[in-house]
Image (cartoon, rainbow, N blue to C red):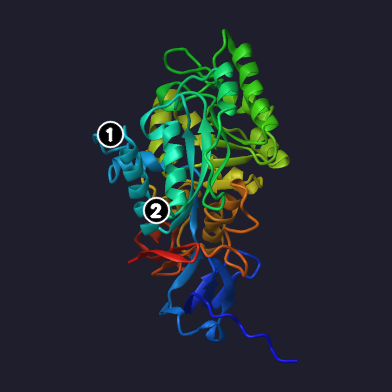
Amino acid sequence: MTAQRIQPADLVVHGGAVHTLGPAGTVPGGLAVRNGRIAAVGEYLTAHIGPDTEVLDLAGRVVLPGINDTHLHATWLGARWPHPLLGAPHEEAPVVTAEDRRAAILRAGDVCAALGITSYTEPGLGPGETGCFSAEVLGEYAALQREGRLRARVTVLRLFGLLDGPSALPDFARGLATPVPAADPAWLAVTGVKIFADGIPPMRTAWTHHCYADGTHGTLLVDGPDDDARAANLAAMISLAHEAGLVVGVHATGERSIEAALAHLREGDHLVHGDLVTPAQLRRMAEHGVGLTTQPAIATAMRPMVAGALGADVAAKAWPLREVLDLGVRLTLSSDAPVVTPDWRVHLAAAGELLGARGVTPDLTARLLRCYTTAAAAQDGSAAWKGSLEPGMAADFCVLAADPLAVAPADLPSVAVELTVTGGRIVHKG
């Protein structure tokens, strides 16, 4: 019997190492890409090279799965770039016309590609909002996907209320009935909804048992005449989304809003931010498969603000990242850009700071990288085909100038991203 001839790859990278972040762990050599998927990983790739194969020498560099930012307001980022909201006052470009929307999305795509980001979740587009968060933005995403112009895979959570503001149960129900534009779900997937349960502690809008300086405790943002009615309406929204087969992401920062949401969230859903989440709540989340999406660089920037709003003791217990990891909650790290930078290296460094990491910590760094890759793919329902670098998985990866597991977390921001590939296509080459 003659051996079956291997079909030549479209792209081969070799001469370095691959952190697969899958069962194979770290593999010397490189990988081969065919038809947008990983064809092979390892040292012996010669058989995959044909006359039309693009071949790149890693020269000792390291390959990682593409970064998946599970909470990135890309259209807003494109309108503001390169000016984050915190610490950089700036008049963002207006987003009014279809061309404005398109330009902002494409600019964000360029930013993401340069950072090694191959997937992101746009968390909150809907009919109640305008500008960067309007339903028209989703339509523009769909048009760009059909044109083959998206440089990252996009997951969208729809929003049937106001960003950082109120929502009403009738509006939510009507919103669920509105159609979603047709698109290839491998590149544009509308998988769920986002609900704003409350605000944030520095603005005294997180719903908490702790007392703000003015004697208030915040409240739920969902409409209702009193706390019980608002909590009931939040529960009804979550139930309606589940009945529609959607996942739910709840923006909740105060422990009272987290409690109100947790009573109704189920496996596959997630909390966003979770600033004041308690150990008991984390245990329930781990038990029921409810994830947490948090932003370490925002945590380090806002801890003094939380101390000013609620006191140093409360601030010291906020963003309990160590407990999240120890209790086995499905954790994804994200940026919330453009609130702060979309640079995942900065957020990993901030996570290391929150965890008290000192020096080179390869096991911890690998665990945090999974929060930006394999755990993120699980959150957006794509773990079966992306997030790790194994044969058959999506060819979404980036090449770093140095091994991230061999440097201290604090030094990660200095490690350059030199190549980004999404779906087997080179989208950034430094």
Identify the residue at horizontal 55%, vertical 50% (top origin). 184
Identify the residue at horizontal 63%, vertical 85% (top origin). 5
For the N terminus, the image quarter is bottom right
Residue 40 on image: x %, y %: 59, 75
Residue 251 on image: x %, y %: 53, 31
Tell me which amino acid carries mark 2. Answer: Cys
Given residues 345 and 385, the one toward you in this image is 385
Q: How many numbered marks are there? A: 2
- In the image as oriented, which residue stretches furthest toward the bottom? 1
Residue receiving disc 1: 94
Q: Secondary structure at mark 1?
A: loop
Q: Is residue 398 above or below residue 303?
A: below
Q: Which mark is residue 261?
A: none
Identify the residue at horizontal 28%, vertical 46% (top origin). 82
For the C terminus, the image quarter is bottom left
Q: Residues within 10 Å of mark 1 (few under 14, many from 20)?
A: some
Q: Is residue 143 above or below residue 367?
A: above
- In the image as oriented, which residue stretches furthest toward the right? 1
Circle nearer the N terminus (2, 1): 1
Q: Is residue 338 visible?
A: no
Q: Secondary structure at mark 2?
A: helix
Residue receiving disc 2: 112
Q: Residues within 10 Å of mark 2 (few under 14, many from 20)?
A: many
